[in-house]
Structures are given as structure tokens and as C-alpha cells.
Image: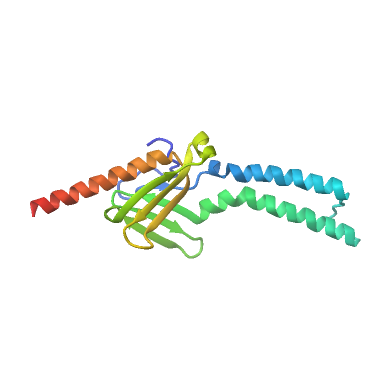
Amino acid sequence: MGGCGKTVKENVEKGVVYKTSRISYVGNYILVGLVLILFFLVWVKFNLEFTLFPRTYFQFQSTLIGFGFLLVMTYLIEEPTIERILRSYMVTNHEIIKLEGFFRKHKLTLPYASVADVQVHKGVIGRIFNFGTVHIRGFKEGGEITIKGVKNPDELHNMIKNKISLMRSKLMKEQQQE
């Protein structure tokens, strides 16, 4: 279980907390590079002038364009941090929990007994850097948790499958004893 993107120690009652990995946003960092190149091309092509206190309409437009590019690049760089603050996932011995929100917390719980399917999706970059998305679908409609951009998704997938099979075998033993 080493290196699954855990942020707290494993505890039998509390479970393991997973957050989106920063490496899963490698596409954002590539986009920042492309936006930066586009920014310099626009700057050179239109001979833009950037000042904090524009005096002419052209300087105002140039400054506005520059801040627009800066805003886009800042969002792309900070998106992983925002995701990690707003969303966390917990895998316990009995259920999978998704916690969302900053001011208002939304909690979605999916007990192992009601899990219908667990899937792992990895893109090309995800296979190279070993991150992916784990989709957990429940039997009831609306019972779905998607753990985005987690490190070692195959390990998480196997852990959830093992907990599901343990839970189901335990239920079958209880039914046979009755």
C-alpha cells in the first residue's frame, strides 16, 4: 500500500484518505507552456505595451490582454490545489466516502455491499506516470464515486475489490449460519 497518494496514516476506523495527485494535471502544465508561448507571440506581433497605470487606450488594451493571459495561466497552475482543497476520498473497511466542498460539505457514502462495479481508467500520460481515475458504481442510481487523478489506481482498485469480496463472503457466511 505504499505511495497510494495517502495524506494521512492508515487507521482501521478512519480509513485511508486519497486526494487528486498533482501529477495528474501534467496536461495543465503543458497548456501553461503553450499559453506562455502564445502570449509572447501576441506580444511581439502586436507590439503590446504593458504598464500598471495605462495612459492610452492601446496601453489599456495591452495591459488587459496581459492580465487575461496571466489569469488563465494562474488558473491552470492552481487547479490541482483547488481540487485537493475541495475534494477528498476515504476508503474504510465498510464503505467509500467522497467529501466535497469548502464552506458547505457534501458527503456521499457508498457501502461495499452496494457496489456494482469498479473500473480504472488511465490515459497514455497516466500509464507513464502511474495515475488514473477509479470509477465506483453502485447498484442504486446516483450511487457513483469517481476518484480522479489518484496515484497507483490499480492498487486502489485491487484494495476496493478485496474489501468488496471480503464483505460479500462475510455476508454469505452469516446467511448460511441462519
* Apparent side of residue 104 relative to residue 81 in the rendered image (left or right): left
Q: Position of residue 26 (x, y in %)?
A: 59, 42
* Apparent side of residue 79 relative to residue 2 in the rendered image (left or right): right
Q: Quadrant of residue 111?
A: bottom left
Q: Position of residue 104 (x, y in %)?
A: 48, 65
On-image quarter of the C terminus: bottom left
Q: Nearer the viewer, residue 120 or 97?
A: 120
Task: Count all numbered tags in the image, as a single digit.
Answer: 0
Identity of the residue drawn at 34% across and 56% down: 138
* Apparent side of residue 148 relative to residue 164 in the rendered image (left or right): right
Q: Position of residue 77 (x, y in %)?
A: 63, 48
Q: Position of residue 92 (x, y in %)?
A: 33, 49
On-image quarter of the N terminus: top left
Q: Quadrant of residue 63?
A: bottom right
Q: Nearer the viewer, residue 103 or 178?
A: 178
Identity of the residue drawn at 38% across and 55% down: 97
* Apparent side of residue 168 relative to residue 26 in the rendered image (left or right): left
Identity of the residue drawn at 79% across and 58% down: 64
